[in-house]
Image (cartoon, helix red, strand yellow):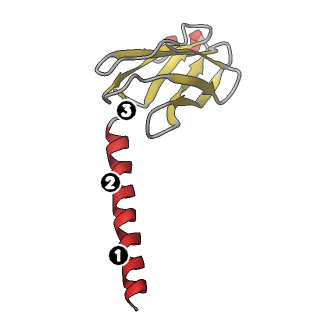
Amino acid sequence: MKKVIITILLGSASYWGWAQNVSETSATKPIIQFSTTELNYGQVALNSDGTRKFEFTNTGTKPLVLTNVVASCGCTATEWPREPIKPGEKGTITVKYNTAIPGTFQKSIRVFTNASPEPVLLTIKGEVKPEATLGNQK
């Protein structure tokens, strides 16, 4: 019986020690925080500039590395910083939607990093209208 009690005590002590190490590790990671995760283009003209920017900050204590930024389709191009973002520094992910495609759209961009949570899901949405249609709504 003494062996069982000792085994339980040692097991629970090692469990609590492991749990404490996990929380210490997560506190020393990079954290990516976006000013917004959704951009609404509204109504834009056909073949207009489809470029928008998502701004983020590394609010963690270690350098933030963006490993990949993936759009949900080929109609959206992305650019992101390849160098580490130091704690407290800001960065920008640029997305460009192909406004030669008329109609409504909603696209997602997945951001993979060394931070938590991972991946982060960004969204762009709007409607591309022919210029003549936009002029009639003013």
Which residue is under mark 1? Answer: 9
Front-most of residues 69 and 26:
26
Q: Is residue 27 left or right of residue 43?
A: left
Q: Name the residue nearer the viewer: 31 or 127.
A: 31
Question: Which of the 4 image quadrants contains residue 8?
Answer: bottom left
What residue type is disc 1 on? Leu
Count of numbered badges drawn on the protein: 3
Residue at the image point whose x is 68% and y is 20% from the top:
75
Query: According to the image, label 3 marks what residue?
Result: 31
User: Callout 2: helix, strand or loop?
Assistant: helix
Q: CA distance from mark 2 to mark 3?
A: 19 Å
List x then y, in percent, for residue 12. 37, 70
Nearer the observer, disc 2 or disc 3?
2
What is the number of the mark on residue 134?
none
For the residue pair 32 and 13, the one nearer the viewer reads as: 13
Q: Nearer the viewer, residue 31 or 6?
A: 6
Name which residue type carries label 2.
Answer: Gln
Decide: few, some or many residues near mark 3? Use Cα within 10 Å; few <14, some 14-19, many ≥20: many
x and y, in percent, of residue 102 in the image: 66, 20
Q: Earlier in the sequence, mark 2 or mark 1?
A: 1
Q: Earlier in the sequence, mark 2 or mark 3?
A: 2
Label 1 element class:
helix
Please state, as top left, top right, bottom left or bottom right, where the C terminus lies in the image: top left
Q: CA distance from mark 3 to mark 1?
A: 35 Å
Badge 1: how crowded within 10 Å, few (<14), some, or many (20+)? Answer: few
The location of residue 53, given as percent across then percent down, is: 45, 16
Is 29 located above or below residue 95 in the figure?
below
Residue behind mark 2: 20
Of mark 3 and mark 1, the one earlier in the sequence is: 1
Residue 12 drawn above or below residue 118: below
Disc 3 to disc 1: CB gap under 8 Å: no
Specify whether 118 is left or right of 35: right
